[in-house]
Image: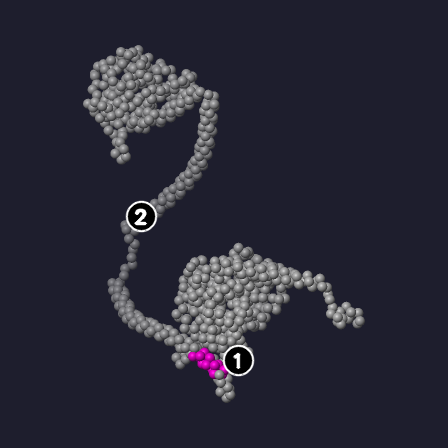
Amino acid sequence: MEGAHENPAESSSSVPNSEEPAGLARGPEVLPREESEGCARPLDAAPKKLCGYLSKFGGKGPIRGWKSRWFFYDEKKCHLYYSRTAQDANPLDSIDLSSAVFDCKADAEEGTFEIKTPSRVITLKSKRKRSWRNSCALCKHHPGLWVWRLPCSPHLPCPWPFRTFPSSILELKYKTQCTIFGAIGRPKEQATDLQEKILPGMRNLRGTSSPYPPTQAPQELVRILHKALEAAQQEKRASSAYLAAAEDKDRLELVRHKVRQIAELGRRVEALEQERESLVHTAGLREQQLQELQRHVQLLVEKNQAKQQVICKLSEQVTRDFMQPPSQTPVPPGAADRDFLSQQEKMEHLKDDMEAYRTQNRFLNSEIHQVTKIWRRVAEKEKALLMKCAYLQAKNCQVESKYLAGLRRLQEASGGECAELLRQLIQEALRCEAREASAEGVELSPVSEYDEYGFLTVPNYEMEDLKLLAKIQALEVHSHYLLAHDAVERPLRERWAALGDLAPSAELKQLLRAGVPREHRPRVWKWLVHLRVRHLQSPGRYQALLSQGQVRKHPAARQIELDLNRTFPNNKHFTCPTSSFPDKLRRVLLAFSWQNPTIGYCQGLNRLAAIALLVLEEEESAFWCLVAIVETIMPADYYSKTLTSSQVDHRVLQDLLLEKLPRLMAHLGQHRVDLSFLTFNWFLVVFADSLISNILLRVWDAFLYEGTKVIFRYALAIFKYNEEEILRLQDALEIYQYLRFFTRTICNSQKLMHIAFNDMNPFPMKQLRQLRTAHRERLEAELRELEQLKAEYLETRNSQGPAVPGGCASEDEGEGEA
């Protein structure tokens, strides 16, 4: 230990080349040679207490560091005490050395060592190099083997794992027993084997002519010895535990533990072997890459040498050219002046041309700017005129419709010559068509004969009154379209154009309720249909169904042929002989009859498929649209033979009408008007025969996304739209006549949509399900009762026998007489 005074008389030692501690305070006694050789000392030869200053590493958190402390060793208690200074009466703490381990790491700072006890680890450092080692006495344990030992009294118990790890090949600690590295209870043969493994290397190292002292041996050998020492210590502990085990079971458990360790080591060896092979493979790849790089470098070197040669040749040529300039032919003295003047003259001409072009360019730019301003003003004026023209045309349609309505009322109220005059005026009004072109050449949009999907805008009714009503309705529809085009239709088209990829969302729901523009409707419907039937679709399914229909005839084929000619007689695509739509419709309906044999074909499916064909135009897309409606959107048994679900929905609508429109239902009930003849068809074909195409397809836009709830909403909205007109009628016959065509009088799609999705709220789906369940139970009970009555009737009829009234001859008798 450092910091204490040293007696010069104590600096000698009986062992050659031994070093006395520089900071150690002890008595004048010196270890005699015979005691050092035997590693034993008598009681009266015990040295005085060791004491001095050492640096102790400690502290908490970020303030940990080295602090100087005064240490002194008590041999009786085998404790090492320390305090702040040598003058302190009470020590700060003590270290129990009876079970301590002295550890000096090979790679630690020189002079630093650790004292390890079972409860803590104390790190100390001596400012004088190796002074902790010099505090030990050098003694000879075996011939030719020198070891270090602390100067302890013989009566002081040796610590059990008491050892110091080597910082050089000579700093090895042994106990007084004939064992190596403190292996207590270890057989002497094992210790001898361990000595034979380590000592030859030490002797060879000592025998070499190295310029360095033994304490400065190569660090690699020090680490090897350190690892060997730790392995031996672990093996010693295991052996001690094995010998200390009281029962065979404990020993067997220790053996099993060793076996598991051996297996684990085997696995680690295999893993290391695989890693070695991987590293060898990687090294081979690296070697190949290195060879490639070397070849590349060689090519670059050769290329560089070639470039150097070229540079040298060019340099030599330049040098020769400078040293020997080429001979030039003499130029006449006046020729150079003439060339210079001609070039200067050309430059002047070019400058004049450039300035002229710049002036012309500025003039043309100003002209273009003026023309652009005029064009913008004209375009804005044209847009305003078109809007004004559309507005005037809409007003004209409204006035014309009011005029026709007035003529109709006058015709009903008057008679005689006035009636004939009114009839002529009505015929002229029906034959009159909107003329094109105004005085300024602005093109108008008259009421065309067919709409964009091929439906007649003015249906060709046989009755003159209905023709007049159809004309009035067409004019009103056209006027609403013209008025709403800029305010509603154009912003809606812009929103659809900016929508991008389709995905279920609240925004898409609102857009579908408002209606899909014609240019986007095929794409949107295909996406909606795929959303419904993607679990049913398979490649080639439609073609396979068509092939199946060609092999054998379906029983429903005859009914399909009968209904083809009755499909939309007011649509040119299904009435024109050269149109391909009837053939497409036939194939779609036959394919569906094979797709769903439980339904086959039901009247009404032809109109559903026809609407899908008009919008989607492709047969397969229309087929899957029909499948989506019948099999996924509509409830089960909707198109069965009993039409059970259709009847249930009709009854549900009656309840909803009583709830939402009680005044109207009371009026209809007063006149005993039954709505089933009208509303039953609405649900079967989703208003296909009832609404004009502009409104019908908006209903389908929302129906394909939201389902049957949309049908109930629009059915209620239709009655609400015409509620006041129906309430004015006070005769059942007039009400029935009005209900025949009152859906065709609806021309304001925005108003109808607002009623359906706003005025009819709240409209929870839970209520709809509960009403359907209740009415289905009642309907099934009625059907069971009807079947029971039918069975009783048949049983009574069979029990009576085929009775023939008296005086009437049977068919058998008549045939016998003949």
- Where 617 sits versus 126, above or below? below
For the point 56% across and 66% down, which residue is it? 604
Q: x, y percentage for residue 458?
A: 50, 76
Reading the chain from its start, which is encountered first: label 1 or label 2? 2
Examine the image and state in which quarter residue 300 appears: top left
Examine the image and state in which quarter residue 34 appears: top left
Q: State the residue in front, 218 or 260.
A: 260
Q: Is residue 706 left or right of residue 780?
A: left
Residue 508 visible in the displayed image: yes
Colour mode of the rendering: one colour
Q: Callout 2: few (<14), some (14-19), or many (20+) C-alpha neighbours within 10 Å?
A: few
Q: Which residue is mark 2?
A: 315
For the point 29% across and 57% down, which residue is it? 328
For the point 29% across and 19% down, which residue is it? 78
Q: Quadrant of the N terminus?
A: top left
Amino acid at the residue labelled 2: Ser
Residue 334 visible in the displayed image: no
Q: State the residue in front, 592 or 630.
A: 630
- Where 671 sits versus 301, above or below? below
Numbered disc 2: secondary structure: helix
**Which secondary structure type mostly characterizes the magenta part of the structure?**
helix
Task: Give the residues drawn in magenta, as a range.
Answer: 399-412
Q: x, y percentage for residue 447?
A: 47, 76
Q: Which residue is mark 1?
A: 464
Examine the image and state in which quarter residue 43 appears: top left
Amino acid at the residue labelled 1: Glu
Q: x, y percentage for residue 149?
A: 31, 18
Q: x, y percentage for residue 369?
A: 31, 71
Q: Residue furthest right?
A: 817
Q: State the residue in front, 369 or 532.
A: 532
